[in-house]
Amino acid sequence: EHPLDIYKNILRAKTVGLNELNGLGENLQLSIGGLITTIREISTKNNQKMAFAKLEDFSSEVELIFFPQVFAKYKKILERDRIYIIKGKIADRSKDSINPGEPKFLVSSMEEISDEEALRFKPRKVTPKTTKIVPRDDQTIYIKLPDGEHHSLLLSIKKLIDKIGRASCRERV
């Protein structure tokens, strides 16, 4: 039994799996989720507190970066062995000389998920609507989903379109 088993439905509906981060570009705003396994607090040159933490889900782990302003806001709720949904973006990998290519996640906000919330959560079913697709000169495809809980579906669609050979596909949530 995995410690995240009771959180499976809420994490799948509201977040992108950590194993998918390697295939995504930098600066893409998204939500990830999982269990905080380590936290390391440091002081900056300006004597401000910031932190690095490890987040683990069912498939992988990622280093989280809490810059001083964000760390100050969430310091009181950030604890090891707790489950969170974290919003932010993938950091620029080229600037990392220690682990080039390893994704890191710049945190902008976070919320803790309680056991009760996870057990109460019922994923919404997305019912496809018939949509008339009108070709446009710029070859842009717009896909609008009913709510913000379907990041992984939107990213799967993006990957599929990228495989087919579309030049550009951006996520907008």
Image (cartoon, rainbow, N blue to C red):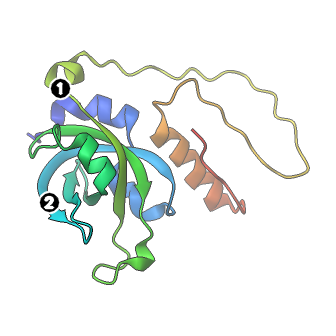
Height in image: 44 above or below 114? below
Viewer-side residue, 87 vs 25: 87
First along the sequence among labels 2 and 1? 2
Viewed as shown, does residue 146 lie left or right of 53? right
Front residue of 109/44: it is 44
Residue 90 location, quadrant: bottom left
Q: Most extreme residue toward the bottom, as rendered? A: 97
Q: Residue furthest right?
A: 137
Residue 7 appears at what percent x and percent y? 22, 32
Residue drawn at 62 percent across, 23 percent down: 128
> What amino acid type should be assigned to the residue bearing mark 2?
Glu
Q: Decide if residue 138 is on the left or right side of residue 48.
A: right
Image quadrant of residue 122? top left
Q: Residue at x 44, y 78 (%)?
A: 94
State the image coordinates of residue 49 (x, y, percent, origin top left): 20, 58
Name the residue beneath numbered marker 1.
114
- The picture places residue 75, in percent across and down from the top left corner, at 19, 44
Say few, some or many: other residues with alpha carbon within 10 Å of mark 2 (under 14 / 14 to 19 / 20 or more): few
Q: Residue at x 65, y 31 (%)?
A: 144
Picture residue at 22% right of the left edge, 48% below the top: 58
At numbered mark 2, what does the secondary structure look like: helix, strand or loop? strand
Q: What is the three-letter code of the residue carrying label 1?
A: Ser
The answer to whether residue 126 is left or right of residue 94 is right
**Residue beneath label 2, please?**
41
